[in-house]
Amino acid sequence: MNLEFSPEEVAFRKEVREFIEENYPRDLIGTAGREDLTREQFLAWHKVLGKKGWSAPAWPEKYGGTGWTSTQRYIWQEENARADTIMPLPFSVSMVGPVIYTFANEEQKKQHLPGILSGEVWWSQGYSEPGAGSDLASLKTTAVRDGDHYILNGQKTWTTLGQFGDWGFFLCRTNPDAPKPQEGISFILVDMTTPGIEVRPIKLLDGGHEVNEVWLTDVRVPVENLVGEENKGWTYAKFLLAHERSGIAGVARSKRGVERLKDIAVKEEVDGTPLLETPEFARKIAQLEIDLMALEYTELRTLASEAAGKAPGPESSILKVKGTEIQQRLTELTLEAVGHYGAPYFYGVQEMGGNDNQVGPDYSNFAAENYFNMRKTSIYGGSNEIQRNIITKMILGL
Amino acid sequence: MDFNFTEEQTMIRDSLERLIREQYDFETRRKFVESDTGFNAKFWGQLAELGLLMAPFSEEDGGLGGGPTDAMVVMEEFGKGLVVEPYLPSVVCGGGFLKRGSKEQKEAYLPGLMDGSNIFAFAYAEPKGRYNLADLETTATKDGAGFKLNGHKAVVIAAPWATHLIVTARTAGGRRDANGVSVFIVAKDAAGVTCRDYPTVDGRRASEVTFNNVVVGAEAVIGDVDNGLPTVELVVDEATAALCAEATGAMRVANEQTIEYSRNRKQFGTPIGKFQVLQHRMADMFMELEQSISMTYMATIRLADDVETRQMAVSAAKTRIAQSSRFIGQAAVQIHGGMGVTDELAVGHYFKRLSIIEGEFGSADHHISRFTKLSAGQKVAAE
C-alpha cells in the first residue's frame, strides 16, 4: 500500500502537462462540454494525440496503446481534466476499439484500428432501440443473410452524435429462433454511408442535438463486417458495456468540476459572505468531495486489479452508479450556486441578443442546461437501476 | 379546521382547468413559447374574461372578493398546464403591491391589471443580491418632488410582456439595511428604462432591466418612503406561497405521467411499473406530492397571520416544495428513461419548470436558514 507518486511519475506528469500546454488547440480552450461543437472540433485533440501515439492509453501496446501503468493513465486523465480538453470520444477508443482488437479478425483490425487511433474515423453506436433500452437483449433490428451480405432492417436510437458517424457498430438479431434472446444477436460493423441508413436528430430537453435515431431499411452490409462469430454478439456487447462503464466514473473531470464550483461559490456572496463559507453550502461541497474521494480510491483499486490482469467486471457498476451520481450532484450544486442567473436560456440569450450576448456572469452560462443534460448519465450505459441489478445478481449472488 | 374550498374557488378551478385543457394543450404551449413574443395573448384575454385576474382582489378594489386561496387555486392549475403567462408577476406581485397602495394608485392601475391590458413585472432581484430582498444597489435619489432611479435588476420575469414594473430601490441607508428600501411603480416605456429580453430555460421570458436616471414622481412610491421592506417581504411571501401552489400542480402531472408511462412501457416482458424498485420510487413521489400540498395549504392560510408565523410557514413550505420538486422532477425523468430527457415529451418540461421553481424567491438553503433564525429566536425569547 502506497499512495505517493514516484519521482518518475512526477516527471511523467510534468511531461504530460507540458505536452498539453504546447499542443492543445488554442481555439478549443474553454469549449469542452458545449453541444454546438463541429465534427472537426470534437476530433481535433484526438488527432493530435493520434500523431503522438497517445490516443488510446488503455490499449495493449501491440495495438497502439502507450504501455503506461494504471497510475500513468490516471495522471493522464487528471492532466486532461485540468486543462479541460475535449477527449477522444468513447465510442471509438473505449468501446468499439477494444471489441475489435479482442474479438475481430486480422483484416478487420488492420482496416479499423488505425482510423480509431488517428481520429480520422468517427464511430457511432447502434445498441438501444425504442423497445429495447434496459432490456437490450430484446432488440428487434434484424440482419438476414443474403449471399455475401447481411440485409439490416430496424431502428436504433440514442445514437450519440450519430450525425457525424462514418462507421457504426450495430447489434442485430441474426437468429430469431434462438432459445434465449441473448443467443441470436450479432455484432456488425456498418459503413454509415451505405444506402438505406437515415440518421434523424432527437432534440433533448436542454435544447441540444446530441443524440439521434438511426433508421435502417434494407441496408446491405458485407458479411466480412461481422465481428467474431455469428450469434455471439451479446458476449462482445457485454464486454463493451463493461469497458464503457469503467470510463464512465469521470473522477478527474469531477475533481475539476469541484474546483470550478468552488470558484463560483467564492464569487457568489450571501449577505457579504462568500457562498463557499455559508454553512449550508460548505457542507454540501464537503460531502461531494468526500464522496468523490471514495469513488477515486475505489477506481484506483479497480485499475490496480485490472493492471494485474483482471478484465473489467461487474464491479465497474459501482463506478458507473457513484460516478454519475457525483456528476449529477455537481451540476445541481452549480445551478444552486448561480442563483437567479440559472434561469436564462443560453442559446436563447444569444439568439435575441445581437452583439450583446451575455446575461449574468460567465460562470452561470449553461448551469441549468448542464443540470438538465446530465440527467442522462443515470440512464445511459445501463441505467443505474440496471447497475444495481448487476451488482445484486453478479456479485451478491441474489 | 377547514380545508374545503368555497363555491367561487371551485368554480375558478373548474373553469380554468377546462380552459387549459381545451386551449392550452402541450403542443399549443410549445407553439407560443417558441414564438417571437413567447406569449399567448388570446389565452391571457380569456383569463381576464373569466374574471381570474380580478379574483384575489376585494370587492372594494373592484375585484371578486377573494384572496390568497384564490391565487393558490389558479397557480395550481397553471402548474398543471405549465402555463407561462404572468399571473404570478402581474396579479400576485403587482396586485399585491397595488392593493396596499394609495387610493389614487389603485384607481390608476388596478382596472387595467384586472382587465389584462396592464401587465406588471416585479423587478426586485439584482446581480449580486441573491435572495436578500434588502440587498440593493439600485438607488432612488431625491429629485425635486420625486425620485431618480439608477441600477440594474436581474432576471425580471415577464418584463418583456410588461407595461409596468414594480421596482425596489434604496432611498436611504447602506446596502442590505432593512431601513431605506422603497417601492416604485415605473412605466416600462419611461425614459431611461432599458430591457434586455431573453427566454428562460423553463419556457418563460425575462429581462435584464437597467435604470439610467429614470425620473418618477412622488406618486410612484407605494407605501412609505424608506419603509418599504415589510411590504416587499409580505408580497414575496404571498408570491412564494403561490409559487408553491404552481409547483404542486406541476408535481401532480409529473407523477401522473410517470405512473402512466410505467404502465405502458414494457421491458423484460413486463410493464416497468411492476418492478418494485420503481414502484417504491413512485410511492415516494406520491408522498412528496401530498406533503407539498399540505404545506402549500398551510402556508397560504398562514399568510394572514403575524409576521413571524407567516415567515416561518412560508419558509417551511418553500423548503419542502424545493426538495420535493427536485425529487419528483428527477425521478420522473429517470423512470421515463431516455424519453425523459427528450424535448418531445412533456415530462422533461415539467422537470425543467420544477428545477427553476426550486430557486425562485429563495432556494431551500435560503429558506431553511430563515426558518432556523426564526425558530431559534422563538426559543431564545421563551427563555
Image (cartoon, coloured by chain):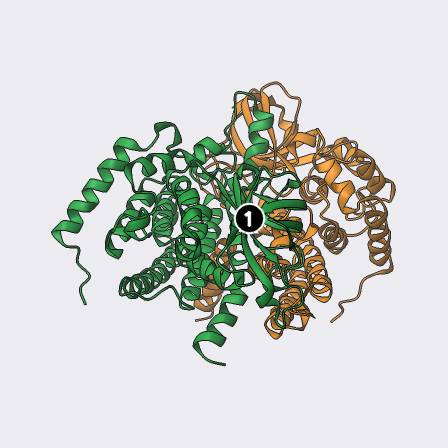
Q: Amino acid at mark 1?
A: Phe
Q: Nearer the viewer, residue A112 or B70?
A: A112
Determine the residue located farthest toward the front in the rendered image.
A147
Residue at image x 57%, y 25%?
A353
Q: Is residue B266 above or below residue B46?
A: below
Q: Is residue A46 left or right of residue B371?
A: left
* Left or right: residue B310 compared with residue A241: right
Question: The chain shown in green is which?
Answer: A
Q: In the rendered image, which residue does mark 1 sit on?
A: A372
Where residue B250 sits: x, y (%)? 69, 55
Residue A33: x and y in percent read 45, 41
Q: Secondary structure at mark 1?
A: helix
Chain B: drawing colour: orange
Percent coordinates x, y for residue A300 in the rendering: 29, 61
Q: Quadrant of the N terminus of chain A?
A: bottom left
- Residue A106 is left or right of residue B153, and the answer is left
